[in-house]
Every structure is written in C-alpha cells, then in structure tokens.
Amino acid sequence: MVESRQIKIRTNGNCDIVDITGQVAGEIEGSRIDSGIVTLFAVGSTAGIGTIEYEPGLVADFKACWERLIPSRVDYQHDRAWGDGNGHSHVRASVLGPSLTVPFSGKRMMLGTWQQLVYVDFDNRPRSREIAVQIMGE
C-alpha cells in the first residue's frame, strides 16, 4: 500500500535548517500503514533533505560547512545567466540531495537517539516550500 501526502513549510533561506521529524512522524501516525518506509522529496532545486543531530552547535557547524565547501560569494555561471544570485544554492542542494528514505515499524521511524530529519533551504531568500511524502508498506 502507498499513501502520498505533502508537508508545507516556510523557510528563511540562506541555509535555513528546519527540523521536520515531528511532522513526518505525524504523517506516518495518521496513515493506515504500520510498517514500511517513508520517502521524503524536496520539491524544488535549491533545497535538500537529510539527517543531523539537531542541536544549536551542530546546526551552526553544518551551516558553516556549506559555506566552506560551496561558498556563496564566488562566481557561478547560473548567476550570470539568470541574475538571481543563487547559483550556490543549486549546487549545495545537488550535493545534499533532494530525497531521503527512512524505515519505520509500529508507526515509529527507526532513527538513532540523536538523529533528526532536516529540510535545508539553500536559496537566498525566504520561501514557501513543499515536501512530497510517500508512505509505503503494510
């Protein structure tokens, strides 16, 4: 059985990291599926989904890491073509990836003690975002 849903969030952009663990857990809880997998997909090309220990120090480290790996203030061909200044956002999102699959059993995700699901908005402005959710199993 497959159930498709969506989660809508507002983000601040500029590597805004949003803990979506509770929202995803709520979608699983509200489904008719007891055990299986949940797949999350960031709709759009300037955001990604992953896991992290969502605590202030690590969130700050994660943001700083992206600036070191894929700086926002360098020349990107995308910016030259479109003039929107978010070339770095597209590259960062491609590296993190747009989707994540998490197993669950008894309607509980099989996450580690300190592991949370996060949506990372790399764009250079606040946005209304959508996460496609597919819950599969029995």
Image (tube, helix red, strand yellow):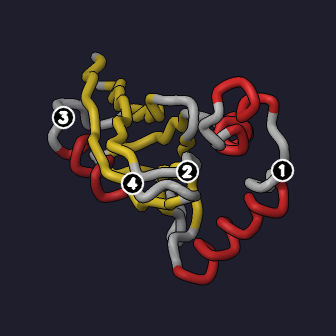
| C-alpha separation, residue under disc 4 versus residue under disc 2 | 11 Å
The reply to whether callout 4 and callout 2 are in contact (CB within 8 Å) is no
Q: Which residue is mark 3?
A: 31
Q: Earlier in the sequence, mark 4 or mark 2?
A: 4
Picture residue at 33% right of the left edge, 43% below the top:
128
Q: Earlier in the sequence, mark 1 or mark 3?
A: 3
Q: Amino acid at mark 3?
A: Ser
Identify the amino acid type marked 1.
Val
Of the two numbered discs 1 and 2 on the same chain, state the one appearing first in sequence: 1
Amino acid on which the number 4 mark rests in the picture: Thr
In the rendered image, residue 51, in percent from the top left (x then y), is placed at 57, 55
Mark 3 vs 4, N-terminal side: 4
- In the rendered image of this protein, does residue 121 appear above or below residue 36? below
| Residue holding disc 4 | 11
Label 3 secondary element:
loop
Of the two numbered discs 4 and 1 in the rendering, the one whose residue sits closer to the viewer: 1
Depth order, front residue of 24/34: 24
* Element carrying mark 1: loop
Mark 1 to mark 2 CA distance (whole Å): 14 Å
Q: Rounded to the nearest whole Å, what is the CA distance between mark 1 and mark 3?
A: 45 Å
Q: Amino acid at mark 2?
A: Asn
